[in-house]
Image (cartoon, rainbow, N blue to C red):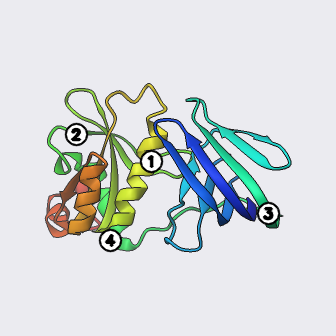
Amino acid sequence: MRLVVARCSVKYEGRLDAHLPEAVRLVMVKADGCVAIHSDGGAYKPLNWMNAPNTIVETDEQWVVTNPKGETLTITFHEIHVETNHEFGEDPGLQKDGVEAHLQELLAALPESVQPGLTLVRREWPTAIGPVDLMCIDPDGNYVAVEIKRRGEIDGVEQLARYLEVLRADANLVGLRGVFVAQSIKPQAKVIAEQRSIACVEVDYDDLRGRRPDDLRLF
């Protein structure tokens, strides 16, 4: 992990043009090549970012980050306050609580509970930024990425949106779309999901437990 705290300005050129005027920010470069620019606020979400893989060309005053699509993120450094590098080592990944982990297990066995006709391809489908809970295929042969939470909040929708952005680089995932699943989903999360073209599905945990196949029963 490379961390730079600096007064900088940022210009993005790609699907649309965006500009961050000069201010003090944190620039983060992860081991996989992902670049993110943060302000001192706004929780986890960066002001701008480029998902890996990227090419970074550095000069004394600028970084030009380019991805395979030809999008560029140009970071101009006006004053660098701190620059450090840290080796994190292997991360064990997010440990889900018991209900959330069991929901994933149940829905993997009963994918039609998410949407009719879905069949499971794989649990914990890997991406460069973490695994998607379930990857399924619908009756038309389109891929469906499913993210499962116990409580459906905005951060879960944003997490799935980031997974989809990375996964869409894989041309083999025909017709890829996302479904956000939870026992209950907050209205604000549903609004964000609609804006991201992500479907929302609420499931009944007790009902799923009652319909689980025999090979999932503990006794």
Disc 1 is placed on an element classified as helix
Mark 3 / mark 4, whichever is N-terminal: 3
Check if mark 1's residue and mark 2's residue have beta carbons within 8 Å: no
Q: In which quarter of the image is the N terminus?
A: bottom right
Q: Which amino acid does label 3 sit on?
A: Glu
Front tag of 1 and 4: 1
Residue at 53% in and 59% down? 47
Q: How far apart are marks 1 and 2 (CA)?
A: 19 Å
Mark 4 and 2 residues: CB-CB less than 8 Å, in contact? Answer: no
Instruction: Pick out the residue farthest to the front.
Output: 21
List x then y, in percent, for residue 149: 33, 64
Q: Name the residue under label 2.
A: 118
- 68 left or right of 186? right
| Front-most of residues 56 and 204 | 56
In space, the residues marked 3 and 4 are separated at their CA atoms by: 48 Å
Residue at the disc numbered 3: 79
Does dot 3 land on a helix, a strand or a loop?
A: strand
